[in-house]
Image (spheres, rainbow, N blue to C red):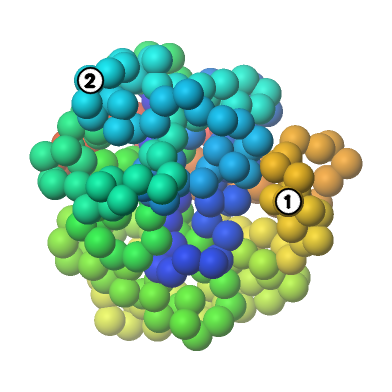
Amino acid sequence: MATTIAVTSGKGGVGKTSIAVNLAITLKNLGNRVYLFDADYGMANAHILMGVNPEYVISDLISNKVTTDQLACDGPNGLKLISGGAGFIDMLNLEQDVRLQTIRAMQSIEEKTDYLIVDVAAGASDGTTAFIAAADRVLVVLVGEPTSFLDAYALIKATHLEKGIIHFNVLVNMAGSDDEAQSYFDKFRKTVTQFLDVSLHFAGSFPMSSKLRKSIVSRKPVCLDERNAREVLALQRVANNIIRSPMNATDGIRFFERSPQGEMVR
C-alpha cells in the first residue's frame, strides 16, 4: 500500500522544497514509484527545481478541466509531479471544502504509487495543518537558528493541538556536521517536549552544500548526480529513518488508506 509523507517547515527559506524534491528522487532511485505533490498552492516552485514545465496545475483539477492522472507530469528519472501552480493569487486562500477536494483527488493514484511526497506550505495555516493531518508521516525541516526553532515549534504546536498529530520527524538542514545537527535536534526536542506531549524523531541532516546551491541554479536536483555521494547518502539515511518512524493515527480525510507501519524503503 502507498505511503504519504508531508514535508513542511515553520518558516520559509530553510530549504524545504529542495529537501522534498530530492527526497522524492531518492525514493525513486531506490526503485519505488513516486509522486511529488507540490501543495503550496499559488506559490509552488518544485517544478522549477526539477527543471520541468507542467502543462496543468492544481487549479485545472479543481475546475474539472483534467483528471489527477492528466494533471501529473513527468519529472526526472520517472518521478511524477503534481504542481500547485505559481503566481495564481486566487489559489492562496482556498476554502476548506476545496482543499478536501484536492486531498480526495489523490486517492485515484493510490494504486499507481508507493510513495506520495507532499510539499506543504511553510507556516501553520489551516491549509498546512490539513495536509499534514491527511498524511501518514510528517517531516519538519529546520535549520540551526533561533527563529527557525521558534517557527517550527509553533507549527508543531498548532498541528498537535488542532489535528492531534503526535509523531514528527525532524531534519536539520544546512548542517555543518552530523554532530552539530544532532546537537541542534537534541536542543529542539528538549524544548518542544517540555511543553507539548509529542514525540520527535531525528530523521537526520542534510549538509551545507555548494553543490546543492549550484543544482538549484541549474534546475537539476543534486541527488540526480551520483558524484554527489555525500548528499545522496544523506537523503538515503533520511528516507529510511522516516519510513521506520511511527505513523500518525488521526481521524478525518486522508490522502490514501492507511499503510502498514514501519515498512522499509525498498
Image quarter where the N terminus lies is: top left
Q: In the image, what residue occupies the spot 40% across and 15% down?
A: 70
Q: Which residue is mark 1?
A: 217
Q: Which residue is mark 2?
A: 64
Query: Which picture quadrant has residue 140?
Result: bottom left
Query: Which picture quadrant has residue 29?
Result: top right
The local crowd at label 2, few if under 14, some if 14 to 19, many if 20 or more residues have their Cα within 10 Å, is: few
Q: Position of residue 58 (x, y in %)?
A: 34, 32
Report helix, strand or loop for mark 1.
Answer: helix
Q: Position of residue 232 (x, y in %)?
A: 74, 44
Residue 164 seen in the figure? no
Task: Indicate left or right for 50 with 162 as reference.
Answer: right
- Are the residues flagged by discs 2 and 1 in contact, CB closer than 8 Å? no
Query: Residue type at mark 2?
Result: Asn
Task: Indicate left or right for 13 with 198 as reference.
Answer: right
The local crowd at label 1, few if under 14, some if 14 to 19, many if 20 or more residues have their Cα within 10 Å, is: few
Image quarter where the C terminus lies is: top right
